[in-house]
Image (tube, rainbow, N blue to C red):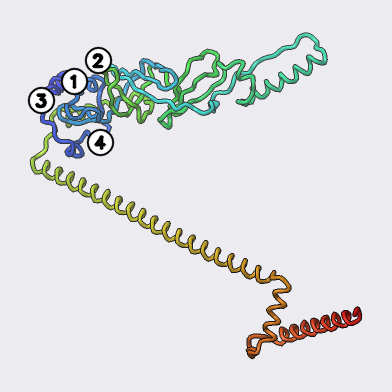
Amino acid sequence: MTSSKRHEKASLPASIYPAFCFKASPTYNKWVKLTAADVHALRREPGFEGQNVFFHLNHPLRYVYLCGPVVAIDFITSRYVLFTLDDSSGANVEIKIERIPPLRPTLHPKLAPVRTVRSHPAPKSNDQEIEDTKETQLDRKYEAGDPNSTRYSLIPDLVPTVTDTTISNVKVVSRCADPQCYAPHVAVDDEIIDIATVIKAKGSLQIWNSCFQLKLERIMTTDTLDEEVRIWEEYAQFARDVLARPWQLTSKEVDGLENEDKDKAKRARERERKREAKRELHAQKKREHDRKEAQREAETERKRREQAEELDGNALDRVKPRRDIDADEDVRINTSLPMDDHAMSGNDSLTIKKKKNKRERKKRRREANEQTLE
């Protein structure tokens, strides 16, 4: 079936299955080999807006596989690079590459800076020789590829810098060291992509300015014509076996897919319920832990205060005035109640007796002095 007949047949109405049936489609989760004309012949269906799902007949497609030469390379500001691919199918497709702005430009590993030639025909004074030594050091740093050399800021067009992209094997060389090329270049696996380079591009479809655009996910270059022919043969076979006729499911298959979707939704709800219960249990345990921790801190603070009050009271007792101590001891000595042997040790008893004898001696000495004065 030719491409024009297939496009006419694609415009015919075909029953669109519900979204839960898409996983059984041979095109939904696959890199579908298409031509640029096939891409522009895809259509959107109501109810699937904003999902980047497009239809060929009733086949749902999200990812496509294109092969062809690059006919244009456009650098959109410093964020995007656009390839225009022409596979001779009667239409072109733009391929978008997103760049990652670097924190600091890096030197390209395979492109060395251009050397500068300096000549000093006339003899120089001492000051000129010192200045020439400084400039020679800058030249050496520049020739060694030192990005901190100030000479890079003097001739920025000759410094090769590289910007990463969202594709791991695609780099954007912002400035080329070759004096004959000053424009930015795109390198795929360290190979510069130029006009007429044949590439194999895989990506997801999206709409930009009412036109289809391919957001690049994978890319490789094609080295030989045999490989390009093999890709076209695979495309022709897939178009003949799959895309040429509508996708059909039996009612039993639809019911089975619906039950699977319901079971999947039920399991998802159950997982969400368990996660919510787990989060609630964790929050409850945390609240209980915080409450017990607050109780422990309050109990520790209460014990600390009681101990501090007890220590403060004992300190006040220890610094009681001397006369109060003597009065207390006189009361203890003159009391008629017997003292408990276990309540006072021998050292305490001896100390009390010594104090009593001392007071008696003081008393007799005071009386003797009074008699002498009389």
The quarter of the picture where the C terminus appears is bottom right
Q: Earlier in the sequence, mark 4 or mark 3?
A: 3
* Residue at position x 31%, y 24% in the image: 214
Dot 1: element: helix
Does the rendering let one see residue 371?
Answer: yes
Within 10 Å of disc 1 (Cα), the crowding (few <14, some 14-19, many 20+) is some
Residue ID for mark 1 = 3
Q: Earlier in the sequence, mark 1 or mark 2?
A: 1
Q: Which mark is residue 90?
A: 2
Q: Horizontal and vertical percent for residue 187?
A: 45, 24
Residue ID for mark 4 = 29
Mark 4 and mark 3: Cα distance apart in space: 23 Å
Within 10 Å of disc 2 (Cα), the crowding (few <14, some 14-19, many 20+) is few
Nearer to us of marks 4 and 2 is 4
Q: Earlier in the sequence, mark 4 or mark 2?
A: 4
Residue ID for mark 3 = 13
Mark 4 and mark 2: Cα distance apart in space: 27 Å
In depth, the one of 306 and 286 nearer the eye is 306
Within 10 Å of disc 3 (Cα), the crowding (few <14, some 14-19, many 20+) is few
